[in-house]
Image (cartoon, rainbow, N blue to C red):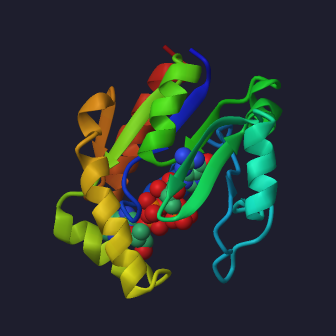
Amino acid sequence: MSGVFVITGPSGVGKGTLIRLLRERVPELALSVSATTRQARPGETQGEHYHFLSDEEFARHVDAGDFVEWAEYSGRRYGTLREELDRHTSGGRPVLLEIEVQGARQVRETLPDATQIFIRPPSDDALRDRLVGRGTDTPEQVERRLNVAGEELSAAGEFKHVVVNDRLDAAVDQLEAIVRGTLEP
Ligand code: ADP
Ligand code: 5GP
């Protein structure tokens, strides 16, 4: 048991919402802050939601081998810095990674003991409604994210744990059971 939990699944499925609720129930869980080259959304702050990097800064970290995993998603780069992960795991704290599917596949190779959880929407329509309802993406960005989602959903079978985020509290119950079952076997 490495104490690393990967939460993956399509954009808009509710990963961020589930993680916030899960961490209220299991406060010892840390959340890894990813690096990205996308622009900050209103209300997002540097170092809290993401480490917002320029293309050049991100490329330097790639060349230096600083990432545990990284991927291109919807024209932007996202990645987990080894230093960010070690900051938590070196003190023995369990940590969550909220990442897309290509990154989760890399973690399967680099950290094979990590617990991987795929979040599914109850339906394609629900995913669209959530992405649109979140109000953070332009209609073009929503379409791009839904196109990627089709591919991502076909990867669900690769994951040991699959949780359907239909009713929020039921999904958090399942996540909590997986995490506690791993941390306190
Ligand atoms: P992700 O982090 O996977 O991109 P978010 O956590 O931002 O997704 O959720 C996308 C939208 O869906 C948000 O507006 C959120 O409030 C909503 N949402 C999340 N889970 C549910 C659920 N179980 N039922 C209905 N709406 C949900
Ligand atoms: P968003 O732009 O909505 O914040 O994130 C877009 C996608 O990138 C989401 O599916 C999110 O899980 C993923 N993501 C966020 N951080 C990382 C990361 O560090 N690595 C990878 N591979 N994906 C990430």
Quick check: 164 above or below 141? above
> In x, y percent, where is residue 33?
70, 51
Count of marks overlaid on the render? 0
Left or right: 9 in relation to 80: left
Residue drawn at x 17%, y 61% as measured from the top left: 123
User: Splitting the image into 4 quarters, where does residue 2 fall?
Assistant: top right
Q: Residue at x 81, y 24 (%)?
A: 90
- The answer to which image quadrant residue 155 occupies is top left
- Image spot of residue 15 (x, y percent): 45, 55
In which of the image's four quarters is ligand 1 placed? bottom left
User: Which quadrant is the N terminus positioned in?
Assistant: top right
Q: Is residue 134 left or right of residue 92?
A: left
What x and y, as percent, mark residue 9? Answer: 38, 49
Nearer to the camera, 175 or 102: 102
- Can you see residue 52? no
> In the image, is 145 to the left or to the right of 111?
left
The residue sitting at 41% across, 40% down in the picture is 175
Q: Is residue 66 above or below residue 100?
A: above
The residue lying at 58 percent from left, 42 percent from top is 97
The answer to whether 101 is drawn above or below residue 76 in the figure is: above
Observer able to see residue 87: yes
Q: Nearer the viewer, residue 21 or 62?
A: 62
Residue 179: give x, y in percent of width and height: 49, 31
Residue nearest the observer in this picture, 60 or 86? 60
Does residue 127 appear to the left or right of 57 in the view shown? Answer: left
